[in-house]
Amino acid sequence: MTVYKKAKDLSDYLSDQKKKGVSAGFVPTMGALHQGHLALIRSSKNENRITVCSIFVNPTQFNNADDFRHYPVTIEKDIEALITNGCDILFLPSEKEIYPDNQAVKEYDLDGLETVLEGHFRPGHFQGVCQVVDRLLNIIMPDRLYLGQKDYQQCKVINKLIELTGKQNNISLTIEPTIREEDGLAMSSRNLRLSVEQRELAPAIFETLLFVKSNFLNRSILQVKAEAYSFLEGKGFNVDYFEIANADTLAPSTNINDPLVAVVAAYIGTIRLIDNVILN
Ligand code: AMP
């Protein structure tokens, strides 16, 4: 695996490869890699000649300074895992490489996606996600981009970004299923920050999502949502939202004929976890 730290070196190399018809798949990450990330690497390996992974803890997408400061960094282990899984290129940029001094800050028009759910509770988060992904896509120009369903709303936002920047004919987006621990907890770099007691509590998030999936057709959606919310609060979670939403627009929905997704964000102590399941 080759490690690139400079955007220009990487984009020169990859555009050369592109001219030779070599396909490239891209997996953007913030590191502290786990099996969820590595499943994306393996999918890219199966479908592309070159697989590029980036590790960059993007400051502009953190609306909470403490969360940014404590975000886990395990770079030596990450490099080992990437090599073991056959990743070809790791892009490991400094902040200046992603946000050079002369680069204007763009505003992205994300419509309703920016004001609901994560957008509502994390103001500015998706603008930050778009800034970093726009820059990374311009450097790497992949044929295929791999994202995890774990961050459902982020997938929708990045799909929109690809449209907004006119890249929809050049980049195909693949969304891979959420990889979970044996007890159902969605793998997340932030899980590393859970205490033993918090880790024991954490699978209740997925349990609640499964409860909703089994019950939303035989009770009213409003009722099932309220039960899910109070179940989690009763267990000691501090719930930002537990919502049943239209799976395309992410607007709240009570119509069982809509494509539906149940989405949740909840704190255990100071650690904020998110998860989702498709309902129908
Ligand atoms: P992150 O490092 O958290 O920014 O995540 C990088 C990519 O990995 C994003 O596309 C995430 O959705 C994806 N990802 C994170 N956790 C999981 C998981 N448990 N299963 C599948 N994909 C995941």
Image: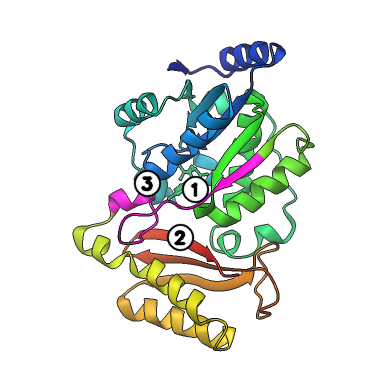
Mark found first going from the N terminus, 2 or 1? 1
Q: What segment is highlighted magenta in the picture?
A: 173-193
Q: Few, some or many C-alpha atoms within 10 Å of disc 2 (few <14, some 14-19, many ≥20)?
A: many
Q: Which residue is drawn at 49% across and 29% down?
A: 53
* Residue 39: % across, % down: 45, 40
* Residue 41: % across, % down: 48, 34
Mark found first going from the N terminus, 1 or 3? 1
Distance (Cα) linking label 1 and label 3: 14 Å
In front of the other: 137 or 259: 259
Q: Residue at x 57, y 70 (%)?
A: 279
Q: In which quarter of the image is residue 115?
A: bottom right
In front of the other: 258 or 93: 258
Quarter the C terminus occupies: bottom right
Tag shown at residue 117 = none
In the rendered image, the residue lying farthest to the left is 196
Type of residue at label 2? Ile
Distance (Cα) linking label 3 and label 2: 12 Å
Horizontal placement of 68 versus 61: left or right?
Answer: left
